[in-house]
Image (spheres, rainbow, N blue to C red):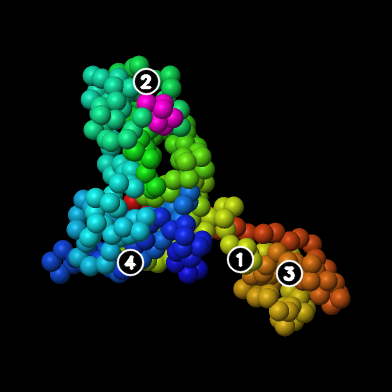
């Protein structure tokens, strides 16, 4: 899949253009390029030491790029940092608050430091992250999940175009992880905010993200659409159990759009790479050849399976 071309350029919120970070002779991030679009949730994945956190720190200006550039809503992080960064809300590490103050007082403190944040906006972001009933509680009484959501509320107060989160589900229990997923989807859907999230929980990324960007050794490995936004016409894998694998292979070998990946004579099965629209033609072709069909099963690879294939089994973190 070609990078960053899932929508028109008018919807591009974030662009990484050949971003590189070197420390001494070591290259941490190497010519990394990808785009993000309005309202899109993108997962940044990679093994240990792939350069994920370094990439996020360069996007938000915590460390300098060696070369390349990051463009946020048309403004360069390198040459117009203040203009670019006003479009960003981010939690790069654990959010920090005054624990002796209430959640509301913490948000009001940030409101006073930020121009243009109205009381109505504060109320809206509190509702958006589901903390209406906790605003009068002191933050020291908050659970980890509530602290994370308060951090997201703070990051959203100034109405950014993009929200950047580094490992937002670290330490959360399953219920907290599910809540976080639901709130991120709501933020993207209702606010039209793009969300870039780094995580080591591949199964969660599969449920949360519209797309993943996979990097290894600082380089782009692949981009892949997920879920409802998966590309139309993408091939699927099916296993067909038949009474004669040899006759089936002969019948299908010249059928356009059908690829025979593997023939398992012992179990009388064929593994095929096809598209949905090809299935009726395959059935018809085998029937005309006198081949009996006992079962057709689609086999789906999980994001974990694909990640291991993309990275050669590298550990993710």
Would you say the magenta stretch is mainly helix, strand or loop? helix
C-alpha span from label 4 to label 1: 27 Å
- Of residues 171 and 38, which is closer to you in this image? 38
Pointer 1 local density, CA inside 10 Å: few below 14, some 14–19, many at least 20: few
Question: Which residue is under mark 1?
Answer: 234
User: Which of pointers 3 and 1 lies earlier in the amino acid sequence?
Assistant: 1
Q: Nearer the viewer, residue 39 or 287?
A: 39
How packed mark 2 is, by other alpha carbons closer than 10 Å (few <14, some 14-19, many 20 or more), is some
Identify the residue under disc 2.
Answer: 135
Helix, strand or loop for disc 1:
loop
Work out how far the residue at label 2 is from the one at label 1, CA to CA, in angstroms: 46 Å
Q: Counting residues from the N terminus, which is met first, the one under dot 4 or under dot 1?
A: 4
Tell me which numbered mark, 2 or 1, is placed earlier along the sequence. Answer: 2
- Residue at the disc numbered 4: 17
Name the residue rendered at 37%, 38% in the picture: 156
Q: Nearer the viewer, residue 243 or 253?
A: 253
Identified at 50% across, 62% down, the residue is: 8
x and y percentages locating residue 243 in the rendered image: 79, 69
Give the magenta range.
119-126
In the displayed orientation, state which residue is furthest to the top. 136
Give me the residue at 37% from left, 44% from top. Answer: 160
Extreme residue toward the front, this view: 116
Which label is found at residue 192? none
Residue at x-position 26% and y-position 67%: 68
- Which of disc 2 and disc 3 is earlier in sequence? 2
Q: CA distance from mark 3 to mark 1?
A: 12 Å
Please give left or right for residue 24 compared with residue 223 in the image: left
Mark 3, residue position: 278
Across and down, in percent, residue 202 comes to: 45, 50
């Amino acid at each position: 899949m070609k990078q960053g071309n899932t929508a028109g350029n008018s919807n591009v919120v974030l662009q990484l253009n050949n971003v590189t970070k070197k420390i001494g002779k070591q290259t941490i991030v190497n010519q990394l390029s990808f785009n993000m679009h309005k309202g899109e949730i993108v997962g940044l994945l990679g093994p240990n030491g792939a350069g994920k956190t370094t990439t996020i720190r360069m996007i938000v200006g915590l460390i300098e790029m060696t070369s390349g550039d990051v463009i946020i809503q048309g403004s360069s992080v390198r040459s117009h940092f203040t203009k670019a960064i006003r479009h960003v809300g981010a939690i790069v590490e654990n959010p920090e608050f005054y624990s002796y103050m209430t959640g509301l007082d913490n948000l009001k403190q940030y409101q006073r430091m930020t121009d243009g944040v109205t009381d109505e906006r504060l109320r809206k972001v509190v509702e958006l992250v589901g903390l209406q009933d906790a605003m009068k509680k002191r933050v020291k009484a908050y659970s980890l999940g509530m602290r994370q959501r308060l951090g997201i509320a703070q990051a959203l107060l100034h109405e950014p175009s993009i929200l950047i989160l580094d490992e937002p589900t670290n330490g959360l229990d399953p219920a907290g992880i599910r809540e976080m997923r639901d709130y991120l989807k709501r933020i993207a859907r209702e606010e039209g905010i793009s969300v870039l999230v780094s995580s080591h929980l591949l199964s969660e990324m599969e449920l949360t993200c519209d797309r993943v960007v996979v990097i290894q050794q600082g380089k782009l490995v692949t981009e892949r659409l997920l879920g409802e936004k998966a590309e139309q016409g993408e091939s699927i894998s099916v296993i067909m159990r038949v009474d004669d694998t040899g006759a089936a292979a002969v019948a299908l070998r010249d059928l356009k759009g059908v690829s025979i990946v593997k023939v398992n004579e012992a179990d009388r099965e064929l593994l095929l790479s096809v598209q949905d629209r090809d299935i009726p033609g395959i059935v018809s072709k085998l029937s005309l050849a006198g081949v009996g069909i006992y079962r057709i099963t689609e086999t789906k690879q999980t994001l974990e399976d694909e990640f291991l294939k993309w990275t050669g089994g590298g550990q993710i973190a």
